[in-house]
């Protein structure tokens, strides 16, 4: 079993709870209550800047030129397509509203991303991996589902699935496995700790939108 698969297996309970969360089910049905989707997207937008900075850290610290270019291309996607989605969705859901204060899981994720960015390539990889792989997981159910008619829901799903996004997650997995194959025990332990913390924050983030 690859290192990334081991990390995924060790967090199975929390991972599956996030992927099968009420929010995900209602997202696919297009029935997320407006206050919930508004809170969720406003909070998600708060750590978009930290996420872009984390990707920039991975670009800077990558030790493989092909991986560096692939991460750089994805950074451009997040800074354009995903950021543009937030702008349009929040203009509809929260017109003229100021950005909210970060909820606890949002602050926790921002802190974790900043910690990973200030660390090494291995740290950046595992936090990016959770953020992208878990979303790919819920956005690509085993049994295909119809896309909701409301673009706010449909576009959020589409941003996290498809051949290009799958290739991006595959790259993060392969890079995580490659780096882990030559890492010392302390680095492996740090990678596992950050991966686990990120998975727990993903579940807490979904819960917070309702609380």
Image (tube, rainbow, N blue to C red):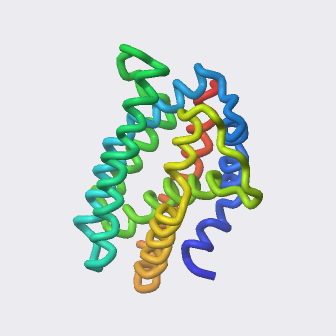
Q: Is residue 92 above or below residue 137?
A: above
Q: Is residue 123 left or right of residue 204?
A: left
Q: Is residue 45 above or below residue 176?
A: above
- Judge whether residue 205 can be spotted in this image: yes
Q: Is residue 188 left or right of residue 7?
A: left
Between residues 200 and 173, which one lies in front from this camera angle?
A: 173
Q: Which residue is drawn at 77% across and 58% down?
A: 143
The image quarter in which residue 133 lies:
bottom right
Q: Which residue is drawn at 29% across and 54% down?
A: 76
The image quarter in which residue 24 lies:
top right
- Judge whether residue 196 can be spotted in this image: no
Q: Is residue 180 left or right of residue 211?
A: left
Q: Is residue 160 above or below residue 148?
A: below
Image location of residue 42, percent across then percent down: 45, 28
Image location of residue 72, percent across then percent down: 28, 63
Q: In this view, does 65 lie to the left or right of 1?
A: left
């Amino acid at each position: 079993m690859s290192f990334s698969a081991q990390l995924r297996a060790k967090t199975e309970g929390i991972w599956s709870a996030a992927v099968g969360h009420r929010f995900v089910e209602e997202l696919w049905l297009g029935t997320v209550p407006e206050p919930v989707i508004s809170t969720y997207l406003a909070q998600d937008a708060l750590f978009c800047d930290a996420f872009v900075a984390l990707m920039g850290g991975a670009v800077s610290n990558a030790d493989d030129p092909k991986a560096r270019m692939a991460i750089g291309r994805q950074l451009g996607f997040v800074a354009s397509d995903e950021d543009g989605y937030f702008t349009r969705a929040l203009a509809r859901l929260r017109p003229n509203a100021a950005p909210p204060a970060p909820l606890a899981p949002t602050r926790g994720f921002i802190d974790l991303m900043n910690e990973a960015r200030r660390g090494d390539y291995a740290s950046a990889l595992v936090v990016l991996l959770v953020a992208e792989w878990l979303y790919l997981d819920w956005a690509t159910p085993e049994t295909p589902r119809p896309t909701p008619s409301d673009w706010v829901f449909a576009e959020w799903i589409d941003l996290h699935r498809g051949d290009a996004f799958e290739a991006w997650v595959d790259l993060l997995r392969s890079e995580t496995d490659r780096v882990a194959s030559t890492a010392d025990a302390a680095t492996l332990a740090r990678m596992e700790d950050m991966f686990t913390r990120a998975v727990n924050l993903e579940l807490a983030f979904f819960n917070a939108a309702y609380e």
